[in-house]
Amino acid sequence: MIVIDGPAELSGELKVQGAKNSTLPLLAATVLCRGQTVLHNCPRLSDVDTAVRILEHLGSRCHWEEGSLVVDNSMTCCQVPPDLMRGMRSSIVFLGAIVSRCGEAELTFPGGCELGPRPIDLHIEALEKLGVEIQESGGCLHCRAPEGIQGTYISLSFPSVGATENVILASVCSQGTTIIANAAREPEIIDLCAYLNRCGGRVYGAGESCVIIDGVKELFGCEHTVMPDRIATVTYMAAAAVTGGNVTLRDVDNTHILPMLSPFEQAGCSVRQLGRALNIMAPRRLNAVRHIRTMPYPGFPTDAQPVVMSMAAVGRGTSIFVENIFENRYKHAEGLQRLGAKIKVEGKVAIVEGVEQLRGAPVTACDLRGGAALVVAGLAAQGRTLVEGEEHIRRGYEDLAGSLADLGARIREVEDSPGKME
Ligand code: EPZ
């Protein structure tokens, strides 16, 4: 668990980690590339460990060289065992890459954060259009592409991030041209396509809603630097905001942060974007963040909703949240209420009446970003907050507690029960 003695006042500088949601599809993409890939700025996370274990099971050799992950690709197997599939949701993006490389793949339904139903129908429909035959039996997906992957026109009914990545990965080495309409536009898709193109792929329009993929014969591994993690960035910004802090974040891509700036401005923070750095200065007491509606990029991201709710919990006035992406993404509200927040949740809407002071209490992280939100709220709370379920947080943050401690928070990870802590 994570133990926080609040309230904190954060100050100082921090380098932001590489993006989890970019690294996972990049690792799946290495399946398509002959030879060696070196991923620089690769975050050390438990989800990355799971992806590495999948790659090793498939026959690749992986090792770390300081902050870089080296993957030597050689495919000896086209199955992903159920325990690794269950480990995380993005294990599903291995499907497109494996079936394209081997002509077949066998895996089970993926796991991941419990954010409500997370179907993979869009992935399956799109792969079938590309010529993949998929049979399901007992939770296992048996996939074959007897004629190879055939380029085609795919129109996604929703701009799903994972389905867009899966189609790109399946079709980058294929016969013909694939066009994806209503593709997801998230920056992580741009990062994936930049890597694939550097490896010899021909993918055009990444970051737009129409992506065109001219199939090539083969790809060769290369060196690539993982983009900065925009959700880790906004998490540290929220931590600075709730503590009246003054924090400078380095290695930030400021263009990715723009869709998330409005609640910080509404709350009264001053945010200065300086090249690849960002400085945030927060007032003693935040204002409400007003109205947040989560949307696909370039809208306000669902992954940032929980940490911004922690800001709203201590802001002066009422804030309204509408969660449009996942059905069950307010689990952190219960933990925030335990800390004294006033939150009413009804379906996809949450109404937050900001209170002057939160009080420390034991709380449980139910998912990755919800866990981060509880840590952020714990920094603002008077007294001791214990956040259990730290394993969720480790999936996406490289040493969250250590980084916040470097900024002056009294926070640490402990293995033991609270009674034995002192
Ligand atoms: C990615 O998940 C991210 N994960 C999530 O980050 C993020 O919350 C999400 O995109 C939305 O931005 C990774 O990149 C590894 P989707 P993904 O497919 O790809 C529905 C985090 O905390 N849908 O865009 O799974 C789905 O149920 C995580 O870092 C279908 O109905 O998201 C959801 O309501 C959690 N059928 C919506 O689309 C499908 O076949 C968005 O899902 C696929 C998706």
Image (cartoon, rainbow, N blue to C red):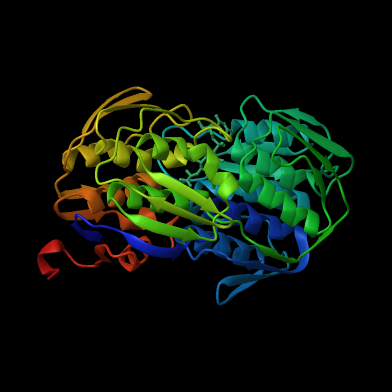
**Residue 149 vs residue 63: left or right?**
right
Q: Residue furthest left?
A: 419
Number of numbered tags placed on the structure image: 0
Q: Quadrant of residue 247?
A: bottom left
Q: Residue at x 62, y 48 (%)?
A: 188
Q: Is residue 346 above or below residue 186?
A: above
Could one spot residue 103 in this view of the protein?
no
In the image, farthest residue toward the bottom? 65
Residue pictured at 33% horizontal, 48% vertical: 282
Q: Position of residue 226 (x, y in %)?
A: 62, 60
Quadrant the N terminus occupies: bottom left
In which image quadrant can residue 306 be found? top left
**What residue lies at 57% left-to-right and 57% top-to-bottom?**
276
Q: In front here: 264 or 162? A: 264
The answer, for residue 24, to whether it is visible in the render is: yes
Q: Nearer the viewer, residue 228 or 116?
A: 228
**In which quadrant will I find the C terminus?**
bottom left
Q: Is residue 55 left or right of residue 234?
A: right
Q: Position of residue 80 (x, y in %)?
A: 59, 55
Residue 330: % across, % down: 34, 34
Which of the two residues, 182 or 142, is positioned nearer the viewer here? 182
Left or right side of 246 for 191: right
Residue 222 position within the rendered picture, expressed as x and y whole percent measured from the top left? 75, 66
